[in-house]
Amino acid sequence: MEKKFYTYIILTVDNTLYCGYTDDPEKRFEKHKEGTAAKYTRVHKPLKMVYLKEFDTKSEAMKEEYRIKHLSRKEKEALCDF
């Protein structure tokens, strides 16, 4: 079985959006909830994952993360499942 990679967006309790990539979305979200995954989600507590897209390579997932980070809030919201 080939390893998959994912780009995700998390909605935080203060209604901000955090985007990242990982090879294990469930484990990564738990790390965010514990406050050990990123400085941003240590301060802006994660509420739920609202976007998840699968890729065959890490490079593709990273490119999608980069693309999303340059979108406006409205454009990011259009991707999300609220």
Image (cartoon, rainbow, N blue to C red):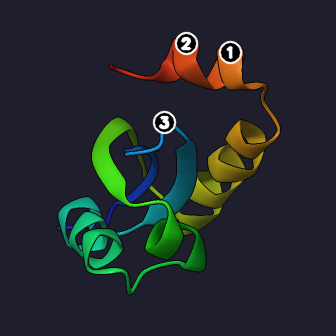
Amino acid beneath label 3:
Asn
Q: Is residue 32 above or below residue 82?
A: below
Residue mark closest to the camera, 3 vs 1: 3
Front-most of residues 42 and 26:
42
**Residue shown at the point (64%, 63%) measured from the top left:** 59
Given the image, on which type of amino acid does mark 2 rest?
A: Ala
Label drawn at residue 60: none
Q: Label 1 amino acid?
A: Lys
- Front residue of 57 and 42: 42
Instruction: Name the element at disc 2.
Output: helix
Residue at which label 2 appears: 78
Label disc, if present, on residue 74 of the rendered structure: 1
Q: Position of residue 9 (x, y in %)?
A: 47, 44
Residue with the mark numbered 3: 15
- CA distance for labels 1 and 2: 6 Å
Q: Disc 3 on helix, strand or loop?
A: loop
Quadrant of the image occupied by residue 46: bottom left
Q: Earlier along the polypeptide chain: callout 2 or callout 3?
A: 3
Quarter of the picture containing the C terminus is top left
